[in-house]
């Protein structure tokens, strides 16, 4: 029997956390339930402990901080990450584990299927489609609901994964990590329920949306530096040639350089473009080396 841990990062979820813990203890009686109290100002931690969960405390606010604390503290063969707001269906957890075992997956994403129109705010729905689509185009993402907070991943995945995110961009980082290492990933759909009355979402549409977008751009810089810097360098070189070639032909024909400031500007842009291209080549080599090290970690971890 594999050792399974349910990881529940929480901030002020006293209203819902007892139900979430109870539901997972019912469907997975052999699993360890771990709750991270992310500096809650209500009774989240005590209620989770009374419900039968082991409670960890993380004083730095932000879901990324809470997930990092849980992954560093908990030892298991499989990790199920889920929100503590009672919006996800616990009974899907065994199905996700079965799917991972049958297909040899390192990540199973449980996408959200709305049960009511109020379950998913329109702004969040549009933002999820935009951000998921961006990752699909940049990384070849096969996952349709990247920002779902309901994910199962393997021990090998966790051992190769160094959490950098501090907030709600953690879901994006998890998916991109799997894609850049070409790990086997899968997805299954499950119901998504509205929060119970009195429970308030901590996700802020615009600030967190921009934070996730910035995380995507940062991950592109880290994981795909060659096309980023080489593309920027190529555009700068073309701009430099567009400014400088007419001056060069004029100098070739007359021996004089007109518009000296333009010539200096074209030279500067050319140097920056060449430097950007060189940086891209260097960073690409470093990225490949780091990726190989993470893959070696995966091989050592796998049974």
Image: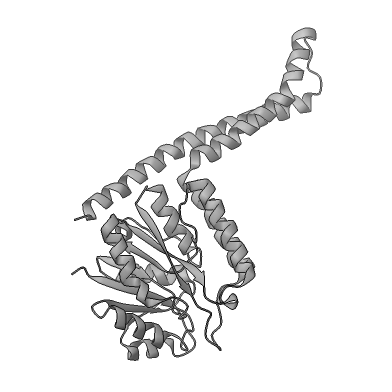
Q: Position of residue 178 (x, y in %)?
A: 39, 53
Left or right: 213 as drawn, with respect to 263: left
| Viewer-proximal residue among 116 and 37 | 116
Q: Position of residue 158 (x, y in %)?
A: 32, 60
Q: Position of residue 1 (x, y in %)?
A: 18, 69
| Viewer-proximal residue among 141 and 99 | 99
| Viewer-proximal residue among 17 and 207 | 17
Going 32% across and 43% down the picture, which residue do you hit?
292
Q: How is the image coloured?
A: one colour
Going 55% across and 60% down the picture, which residue do you hit?
212
Going 59% across and 78% down the picture, which residue do you hit?
118
Left or right: 256 as drawn, with respect to 5: right
Tally of numbered discs:
0
Going 34% across and 71% down the picture, which residue do you hit?
93
Left or right: 269 as drawn, with respect to 212: right
Q: Please identify the quarter of the rendering in which residue 173 is found.
A: bottom left
């Amino acid at each position: 029997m594999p050792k399974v841990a349910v990881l529940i990062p929480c901030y002020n979820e006293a209203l819902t956390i007892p139900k979430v813990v109870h539901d997972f203890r019912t469907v997975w009686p052999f699993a360890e339930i771990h709750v991270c109290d992310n500096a809650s100002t209500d009774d989240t931690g005590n209620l989770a402990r009374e419900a039968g969960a082991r409670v960890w405390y993380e004083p730095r606010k932000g879901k990324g901080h809470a997930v990092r604390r849980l992954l560093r503290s908990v030892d298991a063969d499989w990790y199920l990450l889920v929100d503590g707001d009672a919006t996800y269906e616990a009974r899907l957890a065994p199905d996700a584990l079965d799917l991972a075992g049958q297909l040899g997956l390192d990540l199973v994403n449980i996408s959200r299927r709305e049960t009511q129109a109020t379950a998913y705010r329109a702004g969040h729905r549009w933002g999820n489609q935009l951000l998921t689509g961006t990752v699909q185009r940049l990384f070849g993402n096969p996952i349709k609901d990247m920002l779902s907070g309901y994910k199962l991943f393997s021990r090998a995945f966790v051992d190769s994964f160094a959490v950098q995110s501090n907030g709600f961009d953690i879901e994006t980082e998890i998916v991109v990590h799997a894609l850049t290492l070409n790990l086997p990933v899968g997805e299954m759909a499950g119901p998504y329920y509205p929060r119970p009355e009195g429970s308030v979402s901590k996700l802020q549409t615009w600030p967190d949306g921009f934070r996730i977008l910035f995380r995507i751009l940062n991950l592109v810089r880290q994981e795909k530096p060659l096309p980023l810097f080489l593309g920027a360098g190529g555009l700068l070189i073309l701009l430099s040639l567009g400014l400088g070639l007419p001056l060069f032909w004029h100098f070739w024909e007359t021996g004089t350089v007109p518009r000296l400031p333009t010539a200096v500007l074209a030279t500067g842009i050319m140097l920056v473009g060449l430097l950007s291209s060189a940086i891209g080549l260097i960073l690409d080599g470093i990225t490949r080396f780091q990726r190989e090290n993470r893959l070696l970690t995966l091989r050592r971890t796998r049974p």
